[in-house]
Amino acid sequence: MNKTLEEYFDPLEGYFLNLTRNTQKGIYEMEVGVPKNWVYKKTKKVDVEEVVKSERGILIKISPANDDCVLDDLYEYILVVIETNKKIEEKEEEFKKSIEEVKEEIKAKTKYFYDELNKMKEISFGKFDSIDENIKTDEETKKTPVTETITVDEETPNKLVKKKRGRKPKIKLPDNEE
């Protein structure tokens, strides 16, 4: 099945610029424009020469390195350059995405860590505040005077009994003497 020239060069669209016959050397040469960060190199079959280098990209000339190289080899070389660099770009994008995911994960972990630290601080000092409040209430109860009530004992109505209210006194136990 024969392809037309347009179908043949269609995969190179956007890169392929020129196919010329170098009459002095008796070879065909292809000129291809590629982005400036793309990789390519000379092989055993194909010579690569930079013709023009600019901000937008590089114009390279691809020619046979020996007599065994045919026009299809030049064409295949260009396809390899395009496919290789596209795969490199895809890998770089995947890597950038994975790095961004890791960055987001680290940000989330950092936020979680500092939130936990802040909670810990609040809880710790909250406990201190509640201890301080307990101390204050204990001090207030110590300052409040003990109130005494006088009641009449039913059995002996003439005898008055004093009842104390407030903290219980500490009880001292007698020492055991042996």
Image (cartoon, helix red, strand yellow):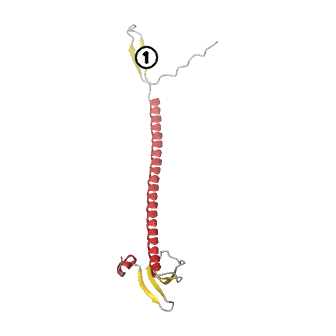
Q: Position of residue 57 (x, y in %)?
A: 45, 79
Query: For mark 1, does the 10 Å Cα neighbourhood hold few (<14), some (14 to 19), or many (20 or more) residues?
Result: few
Which residue is disc 1 drawn over? 162
Vertical comparison of 46 with 94: above or below: below
Q: Is residue 123 above or below residue 104?
A: above
For the residue labelled by badge 1, is the local secondary structure a helix, a strand or a loop? strand
Residue 57 seen in the figure: no
Q: Nearer the viewer, residue 2 or 69?
A: 2
x%, y% of residue 7? Answer: 35, 78
Q: Nearer the viewer, residue 44 or 162?
A: 44
> Which quarter of the figure has residue 154?
top left
Quadrant housing the N terminus: bottom left
Residue found at the very far top of the displayed protein: 155
- Which quarter of the figure has residue 12? bottom left
Furthest toward the bottom, the residue is: 24
Picture residue at 46% right of the left edge, 69% below the top: 88
Q: In the rendered view of the protein, which quadrant contains the C terminus? A: top right
Residue 138 versus residue 150: which sits nearer the camera? 138
Q: Residue at x 45, y 60 (%)?
A: 98
- Write down the quadrant of residue 66 in the picture: bottom right
- Which residue is found at the position 46% from the left and 71% from the top? 84
Q: How many marks?
A: 1
Q: Residue furthest front?
A: 1
* Type of the residue with mark 1: Lys
| Residue 6 visible (yes or no) | yes
Q: Position of residue 143 (x, y in %)?
A: 46, 30
Residue 3 at x, y = what percent?
A: 36, 78
Q: Classify 122 as above or below 12.
A: above
